């Protein structure tokens, strides 16, 4: 895939460029701030953009704002943001429009090369990639008030995998259960959470996440 | 106290005597003024429509006379008054009270003189005429001595009152001083809290932008090494990762040192400052002359003043060297950092504001002198008492 990177730490930027090149991806540009990122996206039309959230000049949420903007202007480009911490609001801002071609990963996830590459592939394929840690924290934060408490432990793990953006087949593989068992669990989850049964996993992720934030 | 009325060094006795005598004369001036101005303005003062103007006029004249009193107090009694502008009401009240006590003082001085003359006559008559009995002599001496004692007491009380009146009118009152001090403490306390937060933010930034990024990069190198297509490739990446791990350690040491230089506790200020000049990108000339041991809080503040300003100079000033002088004189530690750079340092910048708060918290002062074109001089004075 054709990628543009935005990351202010030179060290990390170089590392990412090398990693992606080794995997056979094409890095069109690697920049250190949000303005340059927007310019490069305009110039190159990449498949996927990977951006850090905190970048110069203010080190607040420049990367996130750029990501939201890219999603508005060019929804066909996949966007993966790298966050320092789990930030509910950031995740919400990024996922409000749709949960397609979008990723929200903790920066440390980059260190787990396989998972990072896998998340990138998923976003490129039109799906979502939400960091397992983010999902875990969202689940923890909402347990006190809602029907999630009514889920069985098994359903919970299925929901987490679902929220991360995995397909049913991938969930089955991940948890070593059959596809039909996954579907059964999902149906039970949707019933308990009062969500409409839908197809297309990105919409399911969106529904789940929105539900978790409510 | 940082801005109270300082305990003045007492003026020589004769000078003070002269001051008291001059005070008697200025009291006559005051009396004259009140009589004349009172007669001229009295009617207007009573009439509501002209009262304001007349009052202002009366007060402005009184202000001039009060200026004379102030001059007398500073010249003859070495009083030092802080910057303070009294209200018209205060001025008039002061002048009235001061005139009254001055006149009283003149009366007492007159009585003492009169007593001295009588004592003289008495002494002369003792030597010429021997018609007086011992009882007469003794009773005269006792009476004279008692009157003299009372007069001296009166004079003392009146001069004390003169001093008190002056300090009440020309300086802030005790209450105002306390209020001022409370404001000062509240401000510096708030500033300290803010400075702590700024420091914390900086530590977070240091950890996030430095150490964590390096660790992620290191983990990524290891991840790539594990995916290495060939053993040679994997080896090369491992070697890089090993190097990177050492860099991370260095970075971590630096960050920890910036948070708090432990050398301060174990080796003292001098050694810690030596560490600053070793680390500095610019050559640092260090003068250190502190004879007495310093309180830990002062050492820490002095250390941060030097390390921050030297870092700033290296970053922004384009200087080619920095000169640091740390001098202790029993009660005060003075830190002067001068660079030969382009000047234009902003005292309101976050670094300098933090330092300012740190110094103010110890009742010290921090001055930044950085004209465009340089040089920049930063002077911190820290009380060690």
Image (tube, rainbow, N blue to C red):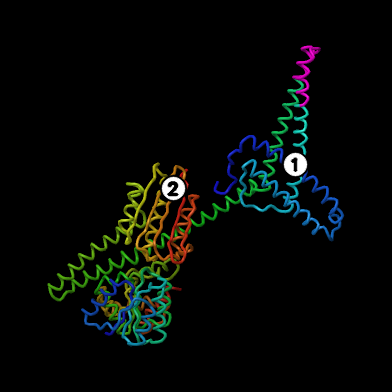
Residue A29 lies in the magenta stretch: no
Q: For marks 1 and 2, give the one nearer the viewer.
A: 1
Task: Residue at 45%, 53% (x, y): give it.
Answer: B380
Q: Which residue is mark 2?
A: B333
How many marks do you count on the picture?
A: 2
Q: On the rendered structure, is B35 left or right of A113?
A: right
Residue B164 visible: yes
At x 68%, y 38%, the residue is: B18
Q: Nearer the viewer, residue B182 or B152?
A: B152
With respect to residue A170, does B365 lie above or below?
A: above
Q: Nearer the viewer, residue B118 or A148?
A: B118
From this viewpoint, which residue is outermost toward the left? B231
Which stretch did the figure color magenta? B117-141
Farthest front residue?
B128
Category of crowding for the residue at label 2, using alpha-carbon neighbours closer than 10 angstroms: few (below 14), some (14–19), many (at least 20): many
The quadrant in which residue B56 appears is: bottom right
For marks 1 and 2, the one nearer the N-term is 1
Chain name for mark 2? B
Task: Report x, y in % for residue B237.
Answer: 18, 70
- Left or right of A60? Residue B55 is right
- In front here: B164 or B350? B164
Query: Which dot marks residue B25?
Result: 1
Residue B20 point in image, percent of width and height: 70, 38
Task: Name the chief secondary structure element in magenta.
Answer: helix
Does the rendering let one see residue A185? Answer: no
Measured as percent of width and height from the top left, residue B99 is found at: 76, 43
Compared to residue B317, the image places residue B362 above or below, namely: above
């Amino acid at each position: 895939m054709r990628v543009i990177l935005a990351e202010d730490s030179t060290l990390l930027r170089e590392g990412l460029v090398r990693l992606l090149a080794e995997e056979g991806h094409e890095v069109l540009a690697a920049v250190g701030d949000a303005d340059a990122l927007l310019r490069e996206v305009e110039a190159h039309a990449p498949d996927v953009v990977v951006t850090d959230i905190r970048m110069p000049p203010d080190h607040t949420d420049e990367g996130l704002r750029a990501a939201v903007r890219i999603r508005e202007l060019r929804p066909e480009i996949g966007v993966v943001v790298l966050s320092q911490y789990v930030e509910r609001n950031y995740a919400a801002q990024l996922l409000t429009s749709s949960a397609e071609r979008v990723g929200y990963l903790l920066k440390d996830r980059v260190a787990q090369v396989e998972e990072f590459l896998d998340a990138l592939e998923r976003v490129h394929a039109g799906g979502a990639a939400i960091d397992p840690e983010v999902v875990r924290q969202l689940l923890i934060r909402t347990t006190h008030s809602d029907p999630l408490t009514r889920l069985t432990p098994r359903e919970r793990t299925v929901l987490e995998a679902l929220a991360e953006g995995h397909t049913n087949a991938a969930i089955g593989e991940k948890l070593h259960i059959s596809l039909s068992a996954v579907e059964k669990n999902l149906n039970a989850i949707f019933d308990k959470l009062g969500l409409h049964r839908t197809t297309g996993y990105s919409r399911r992720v969106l529904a789940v996440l929105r539900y978790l934030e409510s | 106290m940082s801005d109270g009325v300082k305990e003045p060094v007492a003026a020589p006795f004769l000078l003070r005597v002269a001051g008291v005598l001059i005070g008697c004369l200025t009291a006559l001036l005051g009396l004259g003024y009140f009589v004349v101005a009172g007669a001229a303005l009295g009617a207007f003062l009573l009439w509501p429509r002209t009262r304001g103007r007349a009052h202002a006029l009366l007060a402005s004249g009184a202000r001039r006379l009060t200026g004379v009193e102030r001059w007398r107090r500073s010249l003859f009694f070495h009083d030092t008054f802080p910057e303070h502008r009294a209200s018209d009401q205060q001025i008039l009240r002061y002048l009235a009270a001061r005139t009254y006590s001055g006149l009283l003082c003149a009366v007492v001085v007159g009585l003492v003189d009169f007593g001295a003359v009588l004592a003289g006559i008495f002494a002369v008559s003792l030597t010429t005429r021997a018609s007086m009995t011992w009882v007469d002599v003794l009773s005269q001496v006792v009476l004279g001595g008692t009157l003299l004692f009372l007069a001296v007491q009166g004079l003392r009380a009146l001069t004390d009152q003169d001093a008190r009146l002056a300090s009440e009118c020309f300086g802030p009152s005790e209450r105002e001083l306390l209020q001022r001090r409370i404001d000062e403490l509240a401000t510096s306390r708030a500033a300290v809290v803010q400075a702590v937060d700024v420091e914390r933010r900086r530590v977070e930034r240091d950890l996030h932008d430095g150490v964590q990024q390096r660790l992620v990069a290191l983990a990524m190198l290891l991840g790539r090494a594990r995916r290495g297509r060939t053993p040679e490739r994997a080896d090369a990446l491992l070697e890089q990762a090993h190097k990177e791990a050492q860099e991370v350690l260095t970075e971590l040491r630096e960050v920890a040192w910036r948070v708090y230089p432990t050398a301060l506790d174990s080796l003292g200020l001098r050694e810690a400052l030596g560490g600053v000049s070793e680390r500095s990108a610019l050559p640092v000339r260090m003068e250190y002359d502190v004879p007495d041991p310093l309180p830990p809080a002062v050492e820490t503040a002095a250390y941060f003043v030097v390390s921050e300003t030297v870092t700033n100079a290296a970053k922004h000033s384009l200087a080619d060297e920095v000169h640091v002088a740390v001098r202790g004189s029993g009660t005060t530690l003075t830190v002067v950092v001068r660079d030969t750079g382009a000047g234009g340092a902003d005292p309101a910048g976050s670094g300098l504001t933090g330092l300012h708060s740190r110094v103010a918290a110890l009742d010290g002062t921090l001055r930044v002198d950085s004209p465009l074109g340089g040089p920049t001089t930063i002077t911190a004075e820290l009380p060690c008492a």
